Image: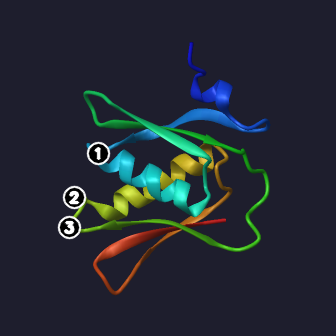
Amino acid sequence: MFPTPAQAATPGTTTALLGTYGFGRAAVIGEAGKAAGAWESFSVRSGFAGDDLTITYSPRTQAYAAEMKVYNAAFDQVADPQAECQQVGTDGVEHKVWVSFRCQTGFVPSYTLFVR
């Protein structure tokens, strides 16, 4: 028998569904969030409405000391990068992955998710 992600998690962490995102996008968001240190691990499950992103993370009640870049949503990769950035940011606040966020547009046509 193999441990489930919740059983294998570090003490003090929790495993929860962050949200459902466009097909192929949950894996991109999951990998970027893990690389940024926002969560410990992630898994993706495809469904009828999109891909579910489940993450293992340490819930936060205080902001990070410095703003952290989580990922970019580019216009050539997603139909509405601003809406996706806002959704991921909101989902993270609701689940206490971070306490606040902002989506910033840059020189390249994209939105970057920054969290605290």
| Mark 2 lies on residue | 79
Give the label, 3 or 2, closer to the camera: 3
Specify whether residue 87 is in view: no
| Mark 1 lies on residue | 22
The residue drawn where x is 56% and y is 63% is 36
Asked whether the beta carbons under mark 2 and mark 1 sit within 8 Å of each other, the answer is: yes
Q: Give the crowd class for mark 3: few <14, some 14-19, many >=20 residues within 10 Å.
A: few
Helix, strand or loop at disc 1? Answer: loop
Which sits in the foreground, 34 or 115? 34
Q: How is the image coloured?
A: rainbow
Which residue occupies the extreme front position in the image?
Answer: 1
The label on residue 51 is none
Kind of residue at badge 3: Asp
Image position of 60 (left or right of 103):
right
Quarter location, residue 28: bottom left
Q: Where is residue 47 in the image (x, y as percent from the top left)?
A: 30, 28
